[in-house]
Image: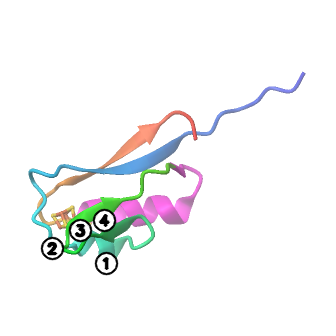
Amino acid sequence: MAIKRKIGGFVLRVNPILCDGFGHCHELAPDLVKVDEWGYPIIRTTPSALSDVEALESARYAVRGCPRQALRIERVSDL
Ligand code: SF4
């Protein structure tokens, strides 16, 4: 019997109280973050696989680049 290995994923989370709504995160991670008409982020809710190095690096880039430290990466166990 084959053992199925679950690969975890991640999503970006935004703290709306800290966010200033200038939309810098969209510029840093356009595949993960869209912005609404006021510039506030609309985060993709579908988890990305942790093995997706490009998406993970993009998320890390956005977290580091957020001037209000309003973003964090949250791990999810299942995709
Ligand atoms: S970069 Fe940070 S503060 Fe700016 S819109 Fe994105 S989450 Fe909000």
72 left or right, relative to 53: left
Q: Residues within 10 Å of mark 1 (few under 14, many from 20)?
A: few
| Residue hosting label 2 | 22
Q: Quadrant of the N terminus?
A: top right
| The CB of the residue at mark 3 lies under 8 Å from ligand 1 | yes
Residue located 11% across and 60% down the image: 68
Percent across and percent down for residue 73 are 35, 48
| The CB of the residue at mark 2 lies under 8 Å from ligand 1 | yes
Closer mark to the observer between disc 1 and disc 3: 1
Residue located 52% across and 33% down the image: 77
Percent across and percent down for residue 14 are 24, 52
Residue furthest top as drawn: 1
Are the residues flagged by discs 2 and 3 in contact, CB closer than 8 Å? no
Residue segment shown in magenta? 48-64
Are the residues flagged by discs 3 and 4 in contact, CB closer than 8 Å? yes
Residue 62: mark in rendering:
4
Q: Earlier in the sequence, mark 1 or mark 3?
A: 1
Q: The disc labelled 3 sits on which kind of residue?
A: Gly
| The CB of the residue at mark 4 lies under 8 Å from ligand 1 | yes
Considering only vertical position in the picture, is 28 above or below 3? below
36 left or right, relative to 20: right
Residue 27: mark in rendering:
1
Q: The disc labelled 4 sits on which kind of residue?
A: Ala
Residue located 47% across and 37% down the image: 76
At numbered mark 1, what does the secondary structure look like: helix, strand or loop? Answer: helix
